[in-house]
Amino acid sequence: MGDFQPDVWVQSVYGFLMDPAVWLTIVWVLTKILIYFIVGRIVVGVAGRAITHMVIEQKAEQRGPVKFDPRRAQTIGRLVNNVVSYTVNFIVIMLILSEVGVDLAPLLAGAGVMGLAIGFGAQSLVKDVITGFFIIFEDQFAVGDVIKTGNFQGTVEEIGLRVTRIKSWTGEVHIIPNGAITQVTNFSTNISVGVVDVSIAYESDIEKATEVIKRTALEVYEANENMTKEPDVLGVQTLGASEVVIRVTFECKPMTHFGAGRQLNAAIKKALDAEGIEIPYPRLVTFTRSE
């Protein structure tokens, strides 16, 4: 190994830096990198605007074979926009690496092998992500809906690509992998039907009681904005051991029939008391024999 000669090294560096071809190559590489970056930003921006425009059109017009609920349209737009952004950024990074002299063949081959290994080792994760995408895309349920899946029932707090969070009415939060959601019952998509059974004594006038119940149910309907249809008094439902049961049905906005039923029960009880119509209750009758 020869002795290090600073003068020779400085002169070689100086000659390299003063070579016009070197600077032309550097400027050309930097120019192409800048072009790749700008084109990538433009593609992402145009795709984002196009996706937003399509989502807004679907929300406003609801045309075409694919229907988007307004609650879901924004989520789908962000999801597709993120996928496009990640894909374009990956391509731009690969192009930039190729311009600076990085051999992409071994890199892509290693990434392919790693991706294959991850795919085999994370099958459940892939299943969760795919299921989460279809839950969002098909609008199976939305944040705020009350659903039941398996042994869990509650209000949906969050929908992700991997997990869904459900909060039960007692406060517990259930975190469920999307791949485990095979069947869903959604209680929040259609109107709810409530049933109220009113018991009266056999001694009471059934026709009078029915009229009182009808009048009271109509008053509750006019005062309760959650009811979507006038309650229907069906008539005598059953003849019990000590009571006659009159059935009332009513329709409400999704998952509001519990509160409406309680309000209807309270109003009917007050109206029956005011009319002197007796509601049956257990009684003990004692007979005494005189000697």
Image (tube, grey):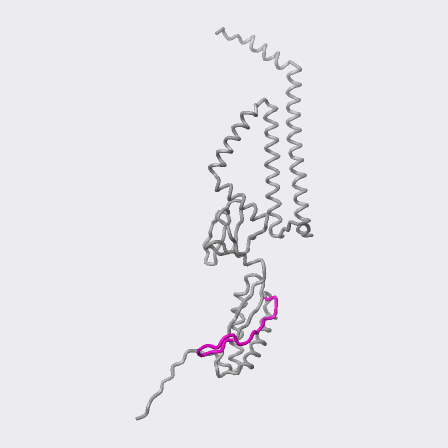
Q: Is 223 part of what is drawn in magenta?
A: no
Q: How many marks?
A: 0
Residue 288 versus residue 107 in the image, above or below: below
- At 63% from the left edge and 51% from the top edge, which residue is drawn? 68
235 above or below 254? Answer: below
Q: Which residues are magenta?
A: 227-245
Query: Is 20 situated left or right of 194 in this image?
Result: right
Residue 283, image x, y percentages = 40, 80
Q: Quadrant of residue 51?
A: top right
Examine the structure image and report whether residue 229 is included in the region drawn in magenta: yes
Residue 25 left/right relative to 1? right
Above or below — where is 49 with respect to 203?
above
| Rendering coords of residue 249 (x, y %) | 56, 70
Asked if residue 188 is positioned above or below residue 119 in the image, the reply reads: below
Magenta-colored segment: predominant secondary structure? strand
Name the spot of residue 162 as percent of width and height, x first: 51, 44
Q: Which residue is located at x 53 percent, y 31 percent?
A: 112
Quarter of the image with the C terminus in it: bottom left
Quadrant of the rendered image containing residue 45? top right
Residue 195, given in percent of the width and then of the height, sits at 53, 69
